[in-house]
C-alpha cells in the first residue's frame, strides 16, 4: 500500500475510503452489507467511512422503499469526478506491480488469496 498511499493522501483519501469509492464506481447503488463484503471491511469501520464520505458529498445514501431500515449507497457526481482523478495513478501502480512481479505470478497470487478468503469464510459458518 505504501506505493498507493501518497496519491490517495494527495486527494484526502485513506486506502479504505478508496476501496469504497472503487467498489461503488464498479457497482453503484450497493446495500451497506454488500459494500462491506466487497470491500472486506467490518460494519463499524464502513459506517465511519460512509459517514465521512457522505459529509464530503462523495457518496449519498438512499433509503430503500421496500424496507426503510435499509439503504443503498451511491457515488455522487463529485465522487465520480474524484474517482476519475485518482484512478489513473492507481492503475499505473498496478501496471508497475505487474511489470515487476509478472502477470502470471500476480494472477496466481490473486487466486490463492481468493482461496484463502473462501477457506476462512467456511470456518466462520
Image: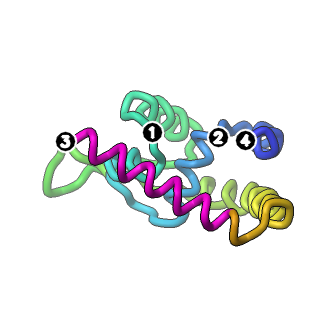
Task: Tell me if mark 1 has few (under 14), some (14-19) or many (20+) residues whose alpha carbon lies within 10 angstroms of its own.
Answer: some
Q: Are marks 4 and 2 in contact (CB under 8 Å)?
A: yes
Q: Residue at x 37, y 57 (%)?
A: 30
Q: CA distance from mark 4 to mark 2?
A: 8 Å
- Location of mark 2 (residue): 15
Q: Is residue 85 visible?
A: no
Residue 17 magenta-drawn? no
> What's the magenta region?
106-125
Q: CA distance from mark 4 to mark 1?
A: 16 Å
Task: Tell me if mark 4 has few (under 14), some (14-19) or many (20+) residues whose alpha carbon lies within 10 angstroms of its own.
Answer: few
For marks 4 and 3, the one nearer the N-term is: 4
Secondary structure of the residue carrying tag 1 is loop
Please say if 65 is above or below 8. below
- Location of mark 3 (residue): 69
Secondary structure of the residue carrying tag 3 is strand
Of the pair 33 and 123, the residue shown nearer to us:
123
For marks 3 and 2, the one nearer the N-term is: 2
For marks 4 and 1, the one nearer the N-term is: 4
Residue 120 magenta-drawn? yes
Q: CA distance from mark 1 to mark 3?
A: 20 Å
Q: Which mark is residue 41?
A: 1
Q: Residue at x 65, y 40 (%)?
A: 15
Nearer the observer: mark 1 or 3; the answer is 1
Amino acid at each position: 500500500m505504501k506505493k498507493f498511499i501518497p496519491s490517495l493522501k494527495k486527494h484526502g483519501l485513506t486506502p479504505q475510503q478508496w476501496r469504497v469509492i472503487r467498489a461503488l464506481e464498479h457497482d453503484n447503488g450497493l446495500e451497506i452489507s454488500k459494500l462491506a463484503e466487497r470491500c472486506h471491511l467490518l460494519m463499524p469501520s464502513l459506517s465511519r467511512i460512509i459517514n465521512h464520505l457522505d459529509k464530503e458529498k462523495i457518496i449519498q445514501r438512499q433509503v430503500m422503499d421496500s424496507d426503510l431500515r435499509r439503504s443503498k449507497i451511491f457515488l455522487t457526481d463529485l465522487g465520480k469526478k474524484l474517482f476519475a482523478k485518482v484512478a489513473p495513478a492507481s492503475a499505473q501502480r498496478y501496471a508497475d506491480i505487474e511489470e515487476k512481479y509478472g502477470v502470471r505470478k500476480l494472477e496466481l497470487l490473486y487466486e490463492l488469496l481468493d482461496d484463502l478468503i473462501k477457506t476462512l469464510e467456511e470456518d466462520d459458518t
